[in-house]
């Protein structure tokens, strides 16, 4: 007996599983709701961890973690990104991330497009990954070609920002700050996926307010490719998708995949 999922009928659940079974290339689009089962707060972008309008430095978080602030006062940006990184380090990937990695093992052309910067998809084993807003796991030098893992960088909270071990200039996280462009490397990967196509798309735990997050769903809809949303709340694409499951991401993904594998 398969587990009942909120928002869809048993018949619809069966249809989704049939689509998953026949699909060779599945695109998963994920946002904060994907990491909610890991205990991270669901927030929009990296600013949402802050419920107060202003940080303790008397400025909105959007200003504190902006590209402009990083250039002018990197110690401010570092302070708040470290707070966000800290909340991620207390958590880990969940079963939903694992299911997606398992599906990639079974269907090699499966891809993940995520707006999360927590690095959980990578940690769970997903290789075909587009981290469109970057990742807190990596740092690089703002001046030379040095790249490294954030966990390997020694950080002195009383002497921010950390400096490049090669040239001594300021290091930065590999995340897209407010006012910055999306990373070209990730955009190119997204173009590759859009060009080569996919047979099914899941949009999970994202409000889809960013056009590049909503677009693959809209394109799928136009082409008659099955679209599934997993989100307890209503979003920008809820009126577009074929199936809307109003339940938690990890539970839904595990239930569907166990049925498909049978
Ligand atoms: Zn350097």
Image (cartoon, rainbow, N blue to C red):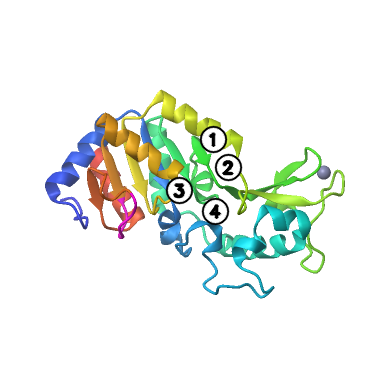
Could you tell whether 90 is left or right of 195 in the image? right
Asked if residue 109 lies left or right of residue 227, the reply is right
Give the Cα distance between marks 4 and 1: 19 Å
Q: SS class of the residue under badge 1? A: helix
Classify 10 Å Cα crowding around label 4: few (below 14), some (14-19), many (20 and above): many
Where residue 141 sits, quadrant-wise, is: top right
| Residue at image mark 3 | 210
Residues at marks 1 and 3, CA–CA distance in whole angstroms: 14 Å
- Confirm or deny contact between disc 1 and disc 2 (CB under 8 A): yes
Decide: marks 2, 3 in contact (CB < 8 A)?
no
Q: Which residue is mark 4?
A: 118
**Nearest to N terminus: mark 3 or mark 4:** 4
Q: Quarter for ligand 1?
A: top right
Dominant secondary structure of the magenta stretch? loop
Q: Nearer the viewer, mark 4 or mark 1?
A: 1
Residue 181 x/y as whole percent: 60, 43
> Which of the two labelled residues, at mark 4 and mark 1, occupies the earlier sequence position?
4
Closest to the camera, between mark 4 and mark 2, is 2
Instruction: State the residue position of label 1.
Output: 187
Residue at position x 70%, y 60% from top? 77
Give the CA separation, mark 4 to mark 2.
17 Å
Question: Which sits earlier in the primary sequence, circle 4 or circle 2?
Answer: 4
């Amino acid at each position: 007996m398969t587990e009942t999922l909120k928002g869809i009928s048993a018949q619809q659940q069966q249809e989704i599983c049939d689509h998953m079974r026949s699909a060779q290339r599945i695109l998963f689009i994920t946002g904060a709701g994907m990491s909610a089962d890991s205990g991270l707060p669901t927030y929009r972008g990296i600013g949402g961890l802050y419920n107060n309008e202003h940080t303790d430095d008397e400025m909105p978080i959007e200003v504190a973690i902006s590209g402009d602030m990083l250039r002018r006062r990197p110690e401010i940006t570092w302070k708040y990104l470290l707070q966000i990184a800290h909340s991620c380090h207390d958590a880990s990937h969940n079963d939903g991330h694992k299911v997606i990695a398992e599906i990639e093992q079974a269907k090699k052309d499966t891809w993940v497009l995520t707006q999360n910067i927590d690095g959980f998809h990578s940690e769970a084993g997903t290789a075909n990954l587009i981290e469109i807003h970057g990742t807190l796991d990596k740092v690089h030098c703002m001046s030379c070609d040095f790249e490294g893992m954030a966990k390997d960088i020694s950080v002195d909270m009383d002497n921010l920002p950390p400096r490049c071990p090669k040239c001594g200039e300021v290091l930065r996280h590999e995340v897209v700050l407010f006012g910055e462009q999306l990373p070209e490397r990730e955009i190119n990967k997204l173009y590759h996926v859009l060009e080569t196509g996919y047979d099914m798309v899941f949009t999970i735990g994202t409000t889809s307010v960013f056009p590049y997050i909503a677009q693959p769903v809209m394109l799928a809809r136009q082409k008659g490719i099955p679209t599934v949303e997993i989100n307890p709340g209503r979003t920008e694409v809820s009126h577009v998708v074929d199936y809307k499951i109003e339940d938690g991401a990890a539970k839904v993904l595990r239930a569907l995949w166990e049925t498909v594998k049978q």
